[in-house]
Amino acid sequence: MRIAGAVGGPRREGEQVEQGSRHMLVKIRPGAQLSGAEQEFVDCLRSFPTTGLAAIDAHVGDNGTRQIDAVLITPRGITVAEVRGFRRRQSGILHVSADEPWTISDNLAELDDENNANPAERLEQSVYAVKSKLERALLDPGHVCGVVALVPLRGVVVRPARTNLRSGIDVVVANVPDSTELQIYIEGFAAGPRSWSADKVISAATALGVTAPSRAELIADGFDELAPHSHMPVAVPVAPPPRTPPPPLPPSRSQHAATWAVVAVALIGMLVVFGVVATAVARDDPHPSRETTSTTVDPTPSPSRPRDCYPFQTDC
């Protein structure tokens, strides 16, 4: 178990540090005076195997004039806690409202608030103050949630253990023996990406006036060293230059000899072709015999046509 900033000095006797386990880191502003309910709330946080930082008794506003009971930061988001205890033992059904007094089984809930103000109203003001403080510190807090933590005396049962007032504002009942709903709330109030890195958490804790854990503590507890979507420059691998083929090597002696052999064979082949053509031309008769026409008359008489004779013709 990793414990930081315990009230009143060093770690209590008998507490052991479990190496390698993740428990919520708790940082309390130096000089803070915690009520019994706030101390019980801190003890609940320290028992959770959850990655996160709890800044207890943070001061915001002009010159740190506004006191915030707790600011809880997880890798996925941030929520502001308003812690309220009870003046006496009250068990029953809790009814909460944004603009009406809170009751337990139709009886006014006797919370340890001297002003008897509606805790939801003060919580909304605290959420706005924390968001403004972080923005002035040049941090983007994203959507800041809020929770009223009602801490009854041990052995008292108040139900329901969790109520939603409106989007982003919840009421959770918890003490050390009965803190399940508080743990579920802390682990699930923000469903966004992991946007809170170790460096960002340190900057936020400093802005809230709380001594920040070391970077090594936060990373060991489960925070990312650098947010995945951080705008810090990231080393981009440089593509290697295009690979150019090496220049061809000068031809060797064997390659020269082979080249000349090919040229010689080609020339010999051409000469052979020319020789064959020349031989064929030489053997051809330059004076071919001409066909003669005879003028001798064939003594054979040509056949004569029979003549028509007239009666008493002497030569017929």
Image (cartoon, helix red, strand yellow):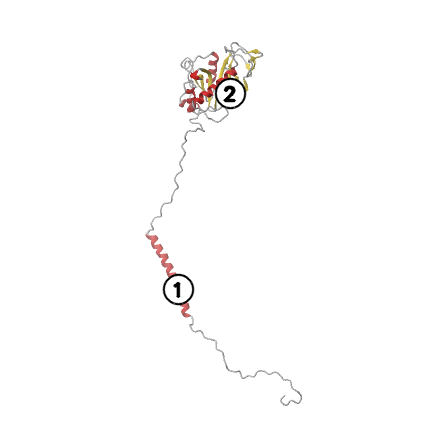
User: Residue 185 bears which disc, if any?
Assistant: 2
What is the C-alpha distance between the residues marked 2 and 1? Answer: 103 Å
State whether residue 49 appears in this view: no
Relative image position of residue 62 (x, y in whole percent)? 43, 17
Relative image position of residue 234 (x, y in whole percent)? 41, 31
Is the C-beta separation of discs 2 and 1 under 8 Å?
A: no
Q: Residues within 10 Å of mark 2 (few under 14, many from 20)?
A: some
Q: Amino acid at mark 1?
A: Phe
User: Residue 274 bears which disc, if any?
Assistant: 1
Residue that lies at the very extreme toward the left in this rendered image? 253
Q: Amino acid at mark 2?
A: Tyr
Q: Quadrant of the N terminus?
A: top left
Relative image position of residue 195 (x, y in whole percent)? 46, 26
| Kind of element beneath mark 2 | helix
- Residue occupying the point 49% across, 17% down: 125
- Residue occupying the point 39% across, 61% down: 270
| Kind of element beneath mark 1 | helix
State whether residue 125 appears in this view: yes
